[in-house]
Amino acid sequence: MRIVLAGIPNAGKTTVFNHLTGQRQHIGNFPGVTVAFRIGRSGMDEIIDLPGLYSLQPSSEEEQVAVRYLRENPPDGIINCMDVTNLRRSLALTLSLMELEIPMILAANMVEECVPAPDLQKLEEWLGIPVFEIRRQNAWAPAVMLRLIRGEIQKGRHPTPPVRGSATEKYRWLDRHNPLPPLASRRRGLSEKLDRLLLHPLWGTLIFALIMGGIFDLTFHRLGPLLTSPFRQAIESMAAMAGAIALPLLRAVVQGAILGVGSVFSFLPSMMLLFFFLAILEDSGYMVRICYLAENIMARLGLSGKSIVPLLIGFGCSVPAVLSARTLGNEKQRRLTIRLIPFFSCGAKLPVYGMLASILCPEHPYLAVFAAYLAGILAGLATAALSPRSRVPLIMEKPPYRLPKAGNLWHRLWGQTTSFIEKAFTILLAASVVATILQQFTPALTYTASPSESILALIAGIPAPLFRVAGLDDWRLISALLAGLFAKESIVSVLAVVLPGGMAPQAALPFLAFALLYPPCVAALSVIRREAGWKCTLQMILLHLAMAFSAAVLLRFLQAFLRL
């Protein structure tokens, strides 16, 4: 059976979906559009988590995709996730979904937060469809929901809406006939008090700066290095053991794979910390407040406060960050936001910054890492300030503050971590092995002990004249930058193979500037091409190349002038 989850935004669909499917899920797309929806399995049933919507009269691209899916691919059943603290809007959508005459149940969420407690039995009798209460402590809730919806499908029960018409007509009808009194969240009063502080132009901005500063401090200074050190020691031990292999080529390949993958893998704890903190911001409801807090600043740059969400997601990975820009209704703001995302350094660049920071600032490497992140943000904001602007007022619903749920945090952290591990043992392993092999043979396919005569040196030497003015004409540095176009972590993997002794301090700063600003990986570029078109993608590539070369050249001459 094919079962759809539908509901207004922030109604708890994602939580229900994760409980129903576990890790058995992937992303789907409608042909011809860019908005994605998640697809998972629960036993023999296929579960589809549609984007949030308010009615079947769409006003955004996300709503258009949800409505189109429901009308063109009618599912066997619908689980309508309802936020009972937002009863009026939730019921208006329920009435619209009933018009589709598809077997349906109502999953009432956040019931324990309501005052007064809602009479769900009365609501079930009024609508004529089963109403199920979702509670956090109900571990068996997913099985019950599936049993209920399967029962409705097998009985062939099609709901009959008590009213039909436009969304406006439904709201008017609900105002007269709603069987339940107005409900409010117990947290609403607390949320309003917190908002007075956290959304204050001065104090709210200071608190946001402290929160982000704390995240970076814990990730790159206090906790991150402590968790990373054991990984590095284990990798060095494994590489030393591989040195006992007798065959030279096999020994080089094994050591290259261990050092290449391991040098990136050692940064996994820091990356997990960053992903964990970003998940907390989102699950607690604070991410929405950041949008409101950033609205005035972003508006001056021609952006919406909503743009801050894709930009913050960009610290994790550019691909989902670009996809999340779909929520921006204004096309100019969406394209500008997409252009800025690569300036917000993704987690894949963290190993690069960490490696170079240990060369540039060995006593306090976290300061160099923080400076790299800050430089990227400032470069992005400068780009936005020079771009054409458009202003659209920010309209978003503020959910009440909640303690993040361990299950939601785990699902997000696990998804990001497994994605990184898959990349480490596919793209990064392949890059390390290929770089090692190409470094062992000459163009005549004869074994060489001199890497400067190898195939890799020949390939990387082709663009070397272009990099000479920036002081980066060393074929080993160029080979790492070329590998970084496929995956930014590959920069560290390849450098571990071709420069096992480490990079010269004089080259580290221009190299950092170039790695910070040059175009994102091919995966991000392919998503950008789908989202914004070829013209925008080519403009971005040229802009990033120009800025990367300019910054590297400027820093090289600055180093020479100051004799650093």
Image (cartoon, rainbow, N blue to C red):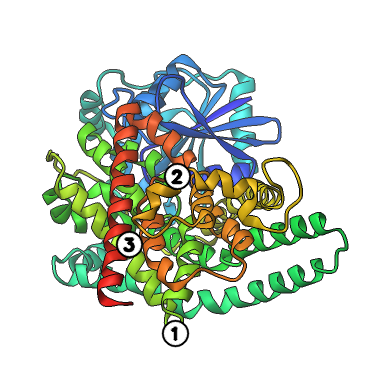
Q: Residue furthest top?
A: 72
- Crowding around mark 1 (Cα neighbors within 10 Å: few <14, some 14 to 19, many 20+) is few
Q: Earlier in the sequence, mark 1 or mark 3?
A: 3
C-alpha distance separating marks 3 and 2: 60 Å
Out of 268 and 328, give the one closest to the viewer.
268
Which numbered tag is attached to residue 303?
none
Give the residue type that dot 1 points to. Glu
Which numbered tag is attached to residue 463?
2
Residue bearing mark 3: 187
Give the residue type that dot 3 points to. Arg
Q: Secondary structure at mark 2?
A: loop
Residue 356: horizontal and vertical position, in percent? 46, 68
Q: Secondary structure at mark 3?
A: loop
Contact flag, marks 1 and 3 (Cβ < 8 Å) = no
- Crowding around mark 3 (Cα neighbors within 10 Å: few <14, some 14 to 19, many 20+) is some
C-alpha distance separating marks 1 and 3: 46 Å
The quarter in which the C terminus is drawn is bottom left
Q: Is residue 150 above or below residue 248?
A: above
Q: Residue at x 60, y 77 (%)?
A: 229
Q: Nearer the viewer, mark 3 or mark 2?
A: 2
Q: Residue at x 52, y 30 (%)?
A: 28
Residue bearing mark 1: 363
Q: Earlier in the sequence, mark 2 or mark 1?
A: 1
C-alpha distance separating marks 2 and 1: 34 Å
Residue 299: horizontal and vertical position, in percent? 14, 49
The quarter in which the N terminus is drawn is top right
